[in-house]
Image (cartoon, grey):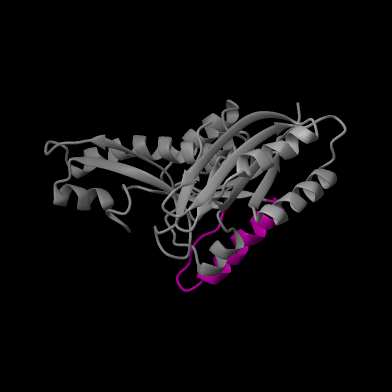
Amino acid sequence: MRQAVFLIQTADRKGLLAEITGFFYSRQFNILLCRQYTDVRENMYFMRLVVDLPADATRGRLEEEFGELARKLELNYSVYYSNETQNVAIMVSKASHCLYDLLMHAEEGDLDCRIPLIISNHPDLESVADRFRIPYFCCPMEKGKKAEQEAQVLDLLERHHIDLVVMARYMQILSDDFCERFPQRIINIHHAFLPAFQGGNPYERAWARGVKMIGATAHYATAELDEGPIIEQDVERISHENDPEELKQIGKDIERRVLTRAVRAHLEHRVITCGCRTIVFNR
C-alpha cells in the first residue's frame, strides 16, 4: 500500500476540514488518518492527513492539483510518501547510550530509516558502529579549525544524501551555517528539562539547586544554543539522596528514550513547527 502524509498549517476559519477532505474524496483517495489541532489563541489550524494512494495516482499530478487548492486556501503544507525511506546520520562524541538505543530500534524496524554512517569527533565509539556494520567517520575538532571540521562533516552528509541529522550526545555546538543547511532536520538531545539548566553540566547544577525532578529534552537544533523548537521531553522524580553521579545514570535512561521518541516522531512526519513551538501529533 502506497501512502502520502500531508502536514498542513494555515489561519483557522470555517470550512477548512470540508475543503481539504473533499479534495481527496472527489478523487477517490481513501483517508486513513486525520488529526487536527486548532490554536485558538493564535487563530492557527494544523492538520496531519494520511491518505492511501490509488494505483493510478502520480506524484506530479497529486502535488500539482493539491498545490492549486493550497494556493486557494493559503495553506502551508508538506507532503511525504511512504515508499521514500529517509537517510539518517548519527553524530556522537564519547557517550554511547543514545547511540545504542537508536541503532537497536532501527535494527528492529521500530525506526523506519537507513543509517548509512555515524560521525564523531572522537574515535571512542567506532567499535559500536562495527557491531552494527555501519561506517564510522572520525572528524576530530582541532582548536581553531571548526570551519574545516564542519566542512568535512557537511561533505559526508551530502555524499550520503542525508535527510536527518541526529546529535546523540554530540558535544559540539554547530555553527549558524551548519544549522541553516538542515533547517528543522537536526535533532539534538539536551540532558536537562529545558528551559532550565541550559548549556553544560546540568546534573551538577540540578544537584546544587536541589531540584526534585530531572529530565531531558529533544529539540531541533538552531543557531541559538538549546533554543530550538522542542519535540519531546520527559522527567523522573529524584530526592536529596541522589548525588550528581546517580543523577547522571538516571538521566541517561531519560535521554535515550526521549531522543528515540523524537526521532520516531520526525521520521513518521508527525511534527509541525510553528515559530519556536511544535505541534506533535499522536501516532
- Residue 251 drawn at (x, y percent): 31, 40
Left or right: 102 as drawn, with respect to 251: right
> Which residue ends up furthest to the front in the rendered image?
14
Residue range highlighted in magenta: 138-161
- Residue 267 drawn at (x, y percent): 59, 40
Name the foreground residue: 219 vs 253.
219
Rendered residue at 74%/36% (across/down) = 24
Rendered residue at 67%/53% (across/down) = 73
Is 143 a magenta residue?
Answer: yes
The quadrant of the image that shows the N terminus is: top right
Left or right: 56 as drawn, with respect to 76: right
- Residue 227 drawn at (x, y percent): 40, 59
The quadrant of the image that shows the C terminus is: top right
Name the foreground residue: 83 vs 31.
31
Name the foreground residue: 27 vs 173.
27
- Residue 200 drawn at (x, y percent): 31, 57
